[in-house]
Amino acid sequence: MSRITILDYGMGNLRSVQKAIEHVGGEAVVSTSVPSSGRLIIPGVGAFGAAMECLAPLREDIERFVQTGDPLLGICLGQQLLFESSEEFVDGGSAHRGLSLIPGHVRYLHRSEGLKIPHVGWNSVQFRDAEGLGEGLEPGSSCYFVHSLITDCADPAHVLATTVYGETFASAVRRNNVWGAQFHPEKSGEVGLRMLRNFLRC
């Protein structure tokens, strides 16, 4: 089992992710640099634009890592950063540019009467594929969310799981060796731990 690197770029829930990986038997290290191989997790809490500024010096290293074919997982904001652009805090200006590892755009959740935004708390996740990250998870398993924005995949085939909160959105995504989870597996109890255990085997 290869080592998992949790990328420290100044905006992440690093220790909780590290503890969850270690709990399921993985070897996790927090690093400010991108490894040449292994497994890579990009966590994230905060704003898209600020996160991309922090990641700018690492962008080419991340692209090289993806080209190796080794697994990469983005968590919460980390999933959003995998996409081409985001409308967060643009106020009519140009969209923030993302890592462009998965085609698509990040946008705000639609506001619906009676629903609070940000979406905070437990919600069900419907995995479309019983393999990969979703292996062994019951349909409708509950995971923990904290977010106001969602990812619109340009190709529906990249949607790995969906959740409903006023609308149906991609709560997990995959393109080849690049994975994303809009929820926090490290805060999602046994379901999240199972998903991280699956990532160790991807």
Image (cartoon, rainbow, N blue to C red):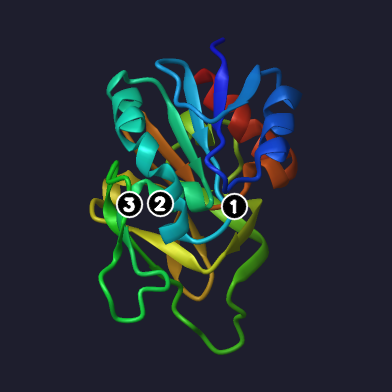
Q: Amino acid at mark 1?
A: Gly
- Label 3 vs 1, first from the N-terminus: 3
Q: Residue at x 45, y 47 (%)?
A: 54
Q: Residues within 10 Å of mark 1 (few under 14, many from 20)?
A: some
Q: Which residue is mark 2?
A: 53
- Judging depth in this view, the residue of 8 and 132 nearest the camera is 8
Question: Going from the N terminus, do you reach mark 3 or mark 2 first?
Answer: 2
- Few, some or many C-alpha atoms within 10 Å of disc 2 (few <14, some 14-19, many ≥20)? some
Within the image, what quadrant is residue 8 found in? top right
Please identify the quarter of the rendering in which residue 71 is found: top left
Disc 2, SS? helix
User: Marks 2 and 3: in contact by CB < 8 Å?
Assistant: no
Name which quarter of the figure residue 37 lies in.
top left
Q: Which mark is residue 152?
A: none
Residue topped by disc 1 = 140
Mark 3 → mark 1, Cα distance in angstroms: 30 Å
Q: Amino acid at mark 3?
A: Gly
Instruction: Looking at this view, name the residue that lies furthest to the front.
Output: 57
Q: Secondary structure at mark 3?
A: loop
The picture places residue 107, in percent across and down from the top left corner, at: 38, 68
Residue named by callout 3: 98
Could you tell me residue 5's position as x and y percent?
55, 24
Which residue is outermost to the bottom? 113
The residue depicted at 44 percent of the width and 78 percent of the height is 110
Camera sees residue 93: yes
Q: Is residue 167 above or below residue 72?
A: below
* Vertical comparison of 36 with 174: above or below: above
Q: Quadrant of the N terminus?
A: top right
In depth, the one of 93 and 102 nearer the eye is: 93
Q: Is residue 80 left or right of residue 96?
A: right
